[in-house]
Amino acid sequence: MDTMKQALGLTGNDRMEVMIDIKDRFLSGTLDLETARTLLKEKIGTCTPDEFAYGEQQLKGSYTDEEITHRMDDLLELFDGILIRANNEYPVHHPLTVYLDEIDAMEQQLGEMETMLQAPHFILNPWLGVYDALTTWRIHLARKQNQLYPVLERYGFDRPTKIMWTFDDAVRDAISESKQLLESGQESEFLAKQADVIDIIRDLNNKEKEVLIPTAWKLLQDIDFITMSRGDHEIGFAFITPPPFYEGRPDAVPSHHSEPSTNNAPQHTFTGANQGHVTQTGSVASTGSVSSTALSGGANPTALLQELAQLVGKYGINGNAEQTHDLAVGSLTIEQIKLIFKFLPVDITFVDENDLVRFYNDTKHRIFPRSSNIIGRVVQNCHPKKSLPLVQEIIDSFKAGRQDYTEMWIDKPDLFIHIEYIAVRNEEGQFKGILEMVQDCTHIRSLSGSRKELIWEGSDSAYHAVDHIDYKHVRKEDGTASTTEQNTVQKSASQSTVYENDLGLTGDTKLFPLFDVIPGLKDHMIHINPNFKMLNSPLAKLMKFKATLSMVAERGEMPLDDLIQAILAFKHNQQ
């Protein structure tokens, strides 16, 4: 908690103790709403978003997460007229700017829904279009959960994980339930639910804008956001065209400051990169610093280098890329070990004996989204609250030695996902962690009979090289080559012969049916744009009835006309 307090510059701020005391008495029923609000105005005057967030975090020991979740609207009502808006100016392409851009785009969708609710007649297709768009909002939520929340936890602010995730799930469920009513033809039930859907989405967006995003801006370092931007692009974006990577602010603290460690305390000396740059209406935010050293070498560079050299020598690691390391059976170089994990046709995640996520293999066929921000994070915080009893039961049963294995599966049309959990124990039988293995078994379940001859498969096979090549890392790490190649692909489409659109392709044309009309097109999509490798991922099957050329062009970060011309060019060349 001191970590969060220091990072926000609230150390020595007696107002916080007064505010927390009044909130506590209000929640316990000792003070009614009007009395508590009057006391807040008299004692503290106004409250900034980060002060509100800190006060919320401080209530952690007094109230359960469920109690705070159910009383959150009461707390916001209590602070009506006291909680002031942060007039922050976020840099272009900054991850927080992107969240706000998505919220603005969602607000346009909600406005369209409100207009349609006023229409004299119900028309199905416009509503189907709206809900096809709303379905992508889960990407916005997934990015928060896998990117923003874990970094906030490292600074001692875990309320978003504990409480905001519950609100996220409520929004996701409301959208999913409405879509099911719409697609099943339950018109009256669907329409009756829409006002609540609009309210719940708008309410969560307001919580993000008023508290979560301003607090993240005040609490996190610029280097955190630079790293976050890379992971954001792995998960994707809702409604908006993917922005360029965020490269950092020129006026921020230099990026030699390391990320906070995973034990909820930043292990470096810093002055908040965003502090002093946050303008709050009616108040001036103070600045603060946290200072500690992770290694005993401290500020002595020579001592630090000597200590690092001892660690390197101890574990036999040197600069020789060809050095092999003895394993239980055989020996491999570090590069070979990385490649084996990378090309395994299964997704692997390892959680150690302390419930910390230590590893996942970064494959391009990954079924469930992962972000490097989960590394070192308590695994219980990586799941929505409704899943926690199941997660905890697996952990407890494995640790106690009652069980060693369990499996689950997801069975949907054209998709079968198999999930295994395996207790990892050493030769003495001591529990060392849990291995999660996830595999798309759709193709395997479709097999019958026997095959003993060699037949090379196309991109629809269970294992295909295109699915597993990480094009962004095959190219130069700085991304220059990938950008150049992608631009070349797009320019070739736009600068070559203009082909007649004899198929009548538009932005609303569905992509997957074209694969039946134009043989070989699916395999060719990766050559039109490397970003289209996603079309070979397992979950792409769920989008086969929804993905339009506009959606695909936006995800591929290329103009729609260029995509259409590239498809027509391929069709022409195949004739």
Image: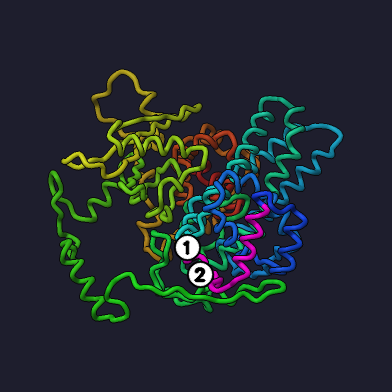
| Horizontal and vertical percent position of residue 463 | 34, 37
Tell me which residue sits at (15%, 55%) in the image: 324
Span highlighted in magenta in the image? 1-26
Helix, strand or loop status at disc 2: helix
Question: What is the residue that sits farthest to the top in this orientation?
Answer: 449
Tell me which residue sits at (31%, 34%) in the image: 456
Q: For residue 299, which numbered disc appears in the image?
A: none
| Horizontal and vertical percent position of residue 24 | 63, 55
Membership of 14 in magenta stretch:
yes
**Residue 382 in view:** yes
Q: Which of marks 1 and 2 is nearer the N terminus?
A: 2
| Horizontal and vertical percent position of residue 37 | 74, 59
| Horizontal and vertical percent position of residue 277 | 60, 75
- Viewer-closest of 66 and 469: 66
Q: Magenta part mainly helix, strand or loop?
A: helix
Q: Looking at numbered disc 1 in the image, what kind of residue is underneath it?
A: Tyr
Question: What is the residue that sits farthest to the front in this orientation?
Answer: 30
374 to the left or right of 328: right
Disc 1 and disc 2 in contact, CB within 8 angstroms: yes
Helix, strand or loop status at disc 1: loop
Question: What is the residue that sits farthest to the right in this orientation?
Answer: 120
Instruction: Characterize the local packing of mark 1: few (<14), some (14-19) or many (20 or more) Cα atoms within 10 angstroms.
Output: many
Tell me which residue sits at (57%, 43%) in the image: 66
Tell me which residue sits at (41%, 39%) in the image: 392
> CA gap, disc 1 to disc 2?
8 Å
- Viewer-closest of 29 and 521: 29
Residue behind mark 1 = 155
Residue behind mark 2 = 7
